[in-house]
Image (cartoon, rainbow, N blue to C red):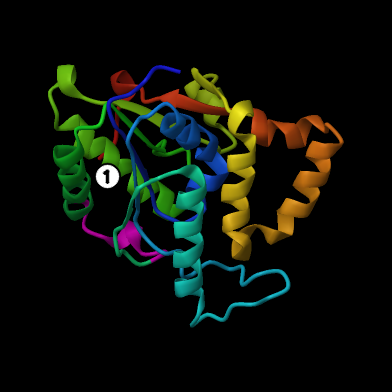
């Protein structure tokens, strides 16, 4: 993996990073690259309250905040930003406000790489609003000074329309950190972790995918149609 100057990760919810990029983040940290994670909400409207339930709708925001900090510690992130937006409302935020928030982070940090969702291919309205804000902010920069933009996509039609992912990160050396980051978000992940760990122990190919490689798409500026 190429050593970056600074990595900026922008997602809307706690645990977005754990499932998709915690191995990549851990690898950058191990390479000595500064990583900033800007998490826009606390995921306080999440449907899961633990399995068996241990949270209430009132206690969930604080629990998820603690889980997010624990996940950041597992990955070695020293610059965690909780941006204070409300879960499931990002699609209703002013577009310019969201983009300006990203612009301010870029101006402060001067990242060489930004990791986020791919607009139109990330399913959840909060994911989409975040992705579009990032694209709008990066688009404002001169082409020669734009950071690389690596995106997660998982809609059913993503490979059909975007092609195969073009970035693959071997996360095998940091698989324990990935599992640890997922465990940190236990209120949301308990339902799947038992089966996942069993599958990994049994060398099940579907389970091993979670801890061997993370894949991304470079944002295709030539097809940019974000409003």
User: Is residue 58 shown above or below 48?
Assistant: below
Q: In the visual, does 206 lie left or right of 146?
A: right
Secondary structure at numbered mark 1: helix
Callout 1 environment at 10 Å: few (<14), some (14 to 19), or many (20+)? many
Residue 40: image x %, image y %? Answer: 34, 56
Looking at the image, which is closer to me, 71 or 76? 76
In the image, the segment drawn in magenta is 87-95
**Residue 67, x across and y down, in percent:** 51, 62
41 or 25, nearer to the observer: 25
The answer to which quarter of the image holds residue 177 is top right
Residue 123: tell me if it is visible: no
* 91 part of magenta stretch: yes
Q: Position of residue 88 (x, y in %)?
A: 42, 64
Query: Which residue does the image show at 46% across and 18% down from the upper left?
Result: 1
* Residue 104 in sight from this viewpoint: yes
The answer to whether residue 199 is above or below residue 157 is: below
| 35 horizontally vs 175: left or right | left
Q: Mark 1 points at which residue?
A: 133
In the depicted structure, whether residue 174 falls above or below residue 46: above
Magenta segment includes 222: no
Measuring from the top left, give residue 211's x and y in whole percent.
66, 34
Picture quadrant of residue 173: top right
């Amino acid at each position: 993996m190429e050593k970056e100057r600074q990595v900026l990760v922008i997602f809307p919810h706690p645990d977005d990073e754990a499932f998709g990029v915690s191995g990549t983040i851990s690898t950058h940290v191990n390479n000595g690259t500064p990583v900033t994670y800007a998490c826009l909400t606390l995921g306080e409207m999440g449907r899961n309250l633990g399995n068996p339930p241990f949270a209430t709708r009132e206690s969930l925001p604080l629990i998820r905040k603690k889980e997010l900090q624990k996940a950041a510690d597992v990955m070695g992130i020293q610059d965690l930003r909780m941006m204070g937006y409300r879960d499931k409302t990002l699609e209703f935020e002013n577009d310019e406000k969201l983009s300006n928030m990203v612009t301010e982070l870029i101006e402060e940090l001067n990242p060489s790489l930004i990791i986020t969702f791919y607009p139109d291919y990330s399913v959840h309205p909060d994911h989409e609003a975040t992705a579009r804000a990032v694209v709008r902010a990066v688009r404002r920069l001169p082409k020669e000074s734009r950071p690389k933009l690596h995106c997660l996509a998982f809609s059913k039609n993503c490979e059909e329309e975007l092609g195969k992912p073009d970035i693959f990160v071997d996360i095998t050396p940091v698989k324990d950190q990935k599992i640890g980051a997922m465990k940190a978000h236990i209120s949301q992940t308990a339902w799947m972790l038992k089966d996942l760990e069993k599958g990994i122990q049994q060398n099940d190919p579907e389970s091993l995918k979670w801890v061997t490689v993370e894949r991304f798409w470079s944002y295709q500026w030539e097809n940019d149609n974000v409003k």
